[in-house]
């Protein structure tokens, strides 16, 4: 990612679709002491501007209606611990203006029936914004990625077909926004916003409600959590806290590159989905000021080749779980990565892996792993795949028929 050794990391993934890139996500990115004064329980040490400058490209936000405007605020009873959404969008717009080859993603929890106010605010207008008029420009609408209209008869395929990074940069649609709705009477006004993408249509995630190392261990094998299992984008939560905010002490150990990388790789193999880790205190645990461990982890993930394919089957198989059994190298957690995860409180994962429509597996240099597809009553061709250190991305179609 954007570290001192590689300031232009996107150049390495230009021809990959958006959903085949691992992005570092800052959990409750807005909930930081620099941006929210009187903050009582932060999740990040650095403000949005510093996060973007450092190389973070995916931000989690909570959006609430407050005092006639829209605010980012953690929880609903933190009094004056909030910031104006328009001010945050202004920082994002400034970054996108000054960095034409960068893409930013927002994961928004939005509360209440605020669809109209959201669109107005993202257009640089909106209620409750008089304090900022003429002082900052927060019109990010020209940068928004708009959901393309699916072709008739190809809706299921087109809905989850993402453009490449190169295409997004070329179209200047460099701000991708996902939504998670709370306390709304109807989703229809939000559905009408073709840029406010339904998070649970496009993404799935590991459980977020972790409190300690034991929960982190459990949620490395108990995945995915929320969202459609067939969704192409996978968020790996990596931020146990034990409080309403985050735990910097926990993050200083959990965010170490070797541990985060190993857990990400296990999750990738268990789900058949490329992970994007979501972390608290993204700079906690840095071993030297010029290196950001969490960003280095994502860079390592993005530098790996992958075997990527799609299960071809009729509607009679939709909604069922296809198992992938790792039939070789069952001790991959310790052997492939040279790391004994038991000292971090994480067990070796089970061998059965749940895979749905599409699958992705990492190709680790020097490692060969055989996967066997299994589902009672169905035949797969090929029935197993062997992945190793290929020189380019590999696409394998696995066809299945009912016996």
Image (cartoon, rainbow, N blue to C red):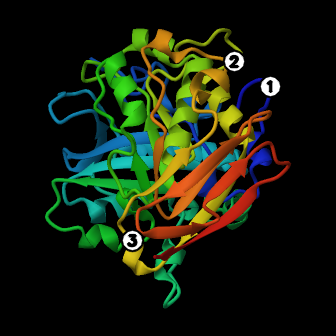
Q: Which residue is mark 1?
A: 5
Are there few (<14), some (14-19), or many (20+) residues within 10 Å of tag 3? Answer: few
Disc on the earlier residue, 1 or 2 = 1
Judge whether 127 appears above or below 379 on screen: above
Disc on the earlier residue, 3 or 2 = 2
- Residue at point 34%, 58% (across, down): 118
Per the model, the C-alpha gap separating discs 1 and 2 is 8 Å
Are there few (<14), some (14-19), or many (20+) residues within 10 Å of tag 2? Answer: some
- Residue at point 40%, 56% (across, down): 229
**Residue 319 on image: x %, y %:** 35, 66
Q: In terms of secondary structure, where does tag 3 sit?
A: loop
Q: Which residue is mark 3?
A: 318
In contact (CB < 8 Å): disc 1 and disc 2: yes
Which quadrant of the structure image shows residue 164?
Answer: bottom right
Q: Nearer the viewer, residue 53 or 237?
A: 237
Which quadrant of the structure image shows residue 223?
Answer: top left
Per the model, the C-alpha gap separating discs 3 and 2 is 44 Å
In contact (CB < 8 Å): disc 1 and disc 3: no
Q: Which residue is mark 2?
A: 291
Of circles 1 and 3, which is in front? Answer: 3
- Residue at point 34%, 45% (across, down): 225
**Residue 334 on image: x %, y %:** 60, 21
């Amino acid at each position: 990612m954007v570290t001192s050794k590689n300031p232009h990391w996107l150049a390495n993934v230009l021809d990959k679709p958006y959903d085949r890139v691992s992005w570092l996500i800052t959990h409750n990115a807005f909930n930081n002491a620099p941006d929210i004064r009187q903050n009582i329980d932060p999740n990040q040490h650095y403000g949005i501007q510093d996060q973007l400058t450092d190389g973070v490209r995916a931000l989690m936000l909570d959006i609430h209606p407050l005092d006639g405007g829209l605010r980012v605020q953690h929880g609903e009873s933190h009094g004056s611990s909030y910031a104006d959404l328009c001010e945050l969008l202004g920082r994002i717009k400034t970054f996108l203006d000054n960095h034409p080859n960068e893409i930013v993603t927002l994961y928004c929890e939005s509360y209440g029936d605020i669809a109209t106010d959201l669109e107005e605010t993202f257009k640089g207008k909106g209620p409750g914004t008089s304090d900022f008029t003429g002082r900052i420009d927060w019109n990010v609408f020209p940068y928004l990625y708009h959901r393309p209209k699916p072709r008739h008869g190809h809706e299921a395929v087109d809905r989850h077909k993402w453009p490449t990074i190169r295409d997004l940069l070329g179209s200047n649609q460099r701000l991708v926004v996902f939504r998670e709705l709370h306390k709304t009477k109807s989703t229809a006004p939000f559905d009408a916003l073709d840029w406010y993408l339904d998070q649970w249509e496009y993404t799935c995630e590991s459980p977020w409600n972790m409190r300690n190392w034991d929960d982190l261990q459990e949620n490395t094998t108990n995945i995915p959590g929320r969202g459609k299992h067939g969704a192409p984008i996978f968020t790996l939560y990596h931020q146990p806290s034990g409080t309403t905010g985050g735990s910097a002490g926990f993050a200083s150990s959990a965010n170490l590159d070797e541990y985060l990388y190993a857990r990400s790789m296990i999750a990738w193999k268990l789900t058949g989905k490329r992970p994007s880790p979501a972390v608290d205190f993204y700079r906690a645990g840095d071993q030297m000021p010029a290196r950001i461990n969490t960003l280095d982890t994502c860079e390592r993930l993005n530098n790996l080749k992958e075997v990527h394919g799609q299960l071809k089957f009729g509607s009679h198989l939709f909604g069922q779980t296809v198992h992938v059994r790792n039939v070789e190298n069952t001790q991959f957690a310790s052997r492939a990565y040279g790391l004994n995860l038991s000292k971090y409180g994480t067990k070796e994962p089970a061998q059965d892996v749940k895979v749905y429509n599409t699958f992705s597996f990492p190709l680790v240099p020097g490692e060969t792993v055989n996967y066997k597809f299994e589902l009672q009553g169905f035949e797969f061709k090929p029935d197993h795949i062997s992945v190793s250190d290929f020189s380019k991305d590999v696409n394998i179609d696995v066809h299945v028929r009912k016996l």
